[in-house]
Amino acid sequence: MTRPDPNQVTRVGVVGAGVIGGGWAAHFLGRGYDVVAYDPAPDAGDRLRRIVDGAWPALEDLGLAEGASPDRLRIADSMAEACADVPFVQESGPERLDLKQRLLADLDSVAPADTIIGSSTSGYGMSEMQRACARPERTVVGHPFNPPYLVPLVEVVGGQKTDPEAVTWASAFYTAAGKSVIEMDVELSGFLANRLQEAVWREALHMVANNEATVEQIDQAMTEGPGPRWAFMGPCLTFHLAGGEGGMAHMLDHFGPSLESPWTRLLAPELTTELRDRMVEGCEREADGRSTAELIAERDRKLIAVLRAREAV
């Protein structure tokens, strides 16, 4: 099989059909692709179809590609079947390095020579995952944000043995598939968005652990404060505006000394049983009896509204 132009791909493989893999399958189906999926779990097919069915109303609301249909999903009986005759495979296996290495090596052994293999890993570098691959040059990271069928971002980066052309092709494919692509310059632990998200998460855990804020207050602080701005303007440009006419230069010159103030605690706090229980109880209070399915539906509905509003402005 000769690798096609990224804009001409019509069929993709998905290996690993959990929350992320299922979200990828829903995204690709919504964009009008044929999807062949494989997961070794006995109930994987039924679970995947439930994920797709749950995502479909949001995809319809957002706008389906011509010909898009959940009927274009096929459950494969083997990894080799999922990889046959597809130019691209999205791997979304469990986040364990030894398993990722073995899974990528297995994919590499059964996928056609020209097939690009993208991994949904949220933290491992491709250099460490591709070590057992016979053809590591076609392996790339394609790190999404959950749910992949709604959140636009995907971070793409290769490993030390990845052919730069594979990264370029994967980035073009993801773009054609409707994603917002960051083609990273270097491998970075946790990638870009996770690193930023993790900093906020650690601060939240510290504030709860030290009785400085509740779970509800932290979430309100984000959704009613930085969150609306960050939907369309990142922290750097936001602080550029905080400098007024002088921009970022004035902001750094004026507020720079305060950056050394001990406001933050970027080291993770000890995850004690007490902290764990308080986080769980706080989230249960916020959920207020709503099931996970209800919260997902609410999240998807509101995400679509934000995406539409952002597009409008």
Image (spheres, rainbow, N blue to C red):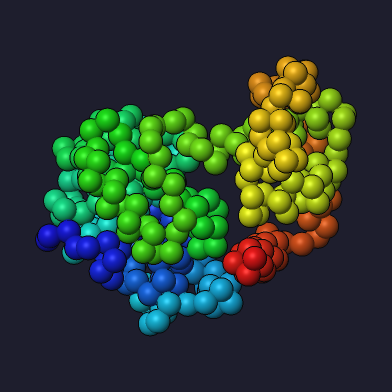
Q: Position of residue 58 (x, y in %)?
A: 58, 72
Residue found at x 32% / y 59%: 173
Q: Is residue 217 left or right of residue 311?
A: right
Image quadrant for the C terminus?
bottom right
Q: Is residue 172 left or right of residue 65?
A: left
Q: Position of residue 45 (x, y in %)?
A: 41, 65
Can the viewer see residue 226?
yes
- Counting labels gives 0
Q: Is residue 68 above or below residue 142?
A: below
Q: Is residue 137 left or right of residue 35?
A: left
Can the viewer see residue 97?
no
Residue found at x 80% / y 36%: 278
Q: Is residue 139 above or below residue 146?
A: above
Q: Is residue 147 left or right of residue 49?
A: right
Residue nearest the observer in this picture, 224 or 281: 224
Q: Position of residue 174 (x, y in %)?
A: 37, 57
Residue nearest the observer in this picture, 103 or 151: 151
